[in-house]
Image (cartoon, rainbow, N blue to C red):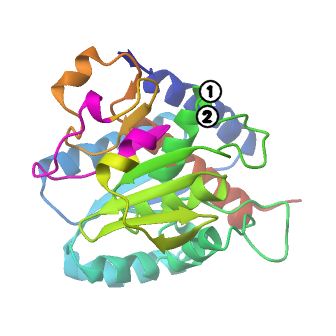
């Protein structure tokens, strides 16, 4: 099995970001909001804070009762000294989380999860505003991390290509509005046919448009050039090497393993996690927000 060094790729990006931050000659301030006592979430929050700080971004991590989040987001939106807001989801595990995402001013939305950025993604609008074509739009951090890893490894196609996934078939097990669906849209915008699975059945995305399909898991897996999983459940039937072609690229972004132990003998490419790259993309989005909306040019 070939396990791609995702850490090396994320380190390359963080080195580039550090240089970009240094050239700004300005102080960027981010506030992270966490409303849980869950130990893994707290550990991730502190790790994120540490990485931002290492690169020269002031990162104020605040633990706050979840019922006070709405008021705090509004306060931070109005605070001109704050350039980015990062919220550690899930909080309520329901539509209240979506409501909170959309409260964040899009000019401070590091995760690009608000409707402003989502609408641009689904319309394949690649500019931050309608008034300035030099300012690029933001993309959600984990889908962007996955694409950057695949691109860096030569799997995604030439970076300069207009549609680098033309003629590729991708299967994604996850259709959340935060990761799986945006990823399917992004990859189909880049030319792929994307089969998207969740508990409600399969859809197929082409040119960012979803359509109904009756394709089975078996049919989708064996046809795929790339298989991506993000199912946070032990009930998910783990993917076995016998279900895919020998040269299929496999990537798991779930906190749980979605591929069987038999993958230890798999001869193709396997990327087991993307966490460090996601943090790098959060920093990238922070820099882009600052450049697009907060930097004072003389």
Give the residue pinned by disc 1: 154
- Residue 64 placement (x, y as % from top left): 23, 69
Label placed on residue 151: 2
Residue at the spot x=19%, y=40% of the render? Answer: 238
Residue at the spot x=64%, y=45% of the render? Answer: 167
- Residue 260 placement (x, y as % from top left): 19, 31
Tell me if label 1 and label 2 are in contact, CB under 8 Å: yes
Magenta range is 221-243
- Considering only vertical position in the picture, is 290 above or below 9? below
| Disc 2 secondary structure class | helix
- Residue 246 placement (x, y as % from top left): 41, 23
> On the image, which quarter does residue 99 sit in?
bottom left
For the residue pair 228 and 27, the one nearer the viewer reads as 228
> On the image, which quarter does residue 257 sit in?
top left
Label 2: few (<14), some or many (≥20) within 10 Å?
Answer: some
| Disc 1 secondary structure class | loop
Q: As drawn, is 175 to the left or to the right of 277?
A: left
Label 1: few (<14), some or many (≥20) within 10 Å?
Answer: few
Q: As drawn, is 69 to the left or to the right of 268?
A: left
- Considering only vertical position in the picture, is 272 above or below 133? above
User: In the rendered view of the protein, which quadrant contains the C terminus?
Assistant: bottom right
Is residue 84 rendered magenta in the image? no
């Amino acid at each position: 099995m070939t396990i791609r060094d995702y850490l090396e790729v994320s380190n390359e990006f963080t080195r580039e970001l550090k240089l970009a931050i240094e050239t700004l000659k300005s102080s960027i301030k981010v506030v992270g909001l966490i409303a849980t006592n869950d130990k893994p979430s707290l550990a991730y929050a502190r790790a994120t804070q540490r990485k931002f700080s290492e690169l020269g971004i002031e990162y104020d991590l605040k633990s706050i009762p979840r019922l006070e989040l709405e008021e705090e987001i509004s306060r931070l939106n109005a605070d001109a000294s704050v350039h980015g807001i990062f919220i550690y989801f899930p909080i309520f595990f329901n539509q209240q989380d979506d409501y909170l995402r959309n409260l964040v001013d899009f000019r401070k939305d590091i995760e690009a999860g608000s409707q402003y950025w989502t609408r641009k993604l689904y319309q394949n609008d690649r500019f931050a505003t309608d008034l300035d074509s030099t300012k690029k739009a933001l993309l959600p951090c984990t889908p962007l991390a996955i694409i950057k890893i695949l691109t860096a490894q030569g799997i995604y196609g030439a970076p300069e290509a207009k549609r680098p996934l033309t003629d590729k078939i991708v299967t994604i097990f996850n259709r959340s509005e935060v990761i799986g669906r945006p990823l399917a849209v992004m990859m189909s915008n880049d030319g792929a046919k994307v089969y998207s699975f969740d508990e409600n059945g399969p859809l197929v995305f082409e040119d960012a448009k979803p359509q109904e399909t009756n394709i089975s898991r078996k049919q989708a897996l064996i046809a795929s050039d790339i298989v991506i999983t993000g199912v946070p459940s032990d009930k998910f039937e783990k993917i076995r090497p016998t279900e895919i072609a020998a040269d299929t690229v496999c990537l798991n972004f779930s906190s749980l393993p979605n591929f069987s132990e038999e993958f230890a003998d798999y001869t193709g490419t396997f990327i087991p996690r993307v966490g460090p790259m996601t943090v790098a993309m959060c920093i990238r989005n922070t820099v882009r927000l600052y450049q697009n909306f907060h930097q004072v040019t003389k």
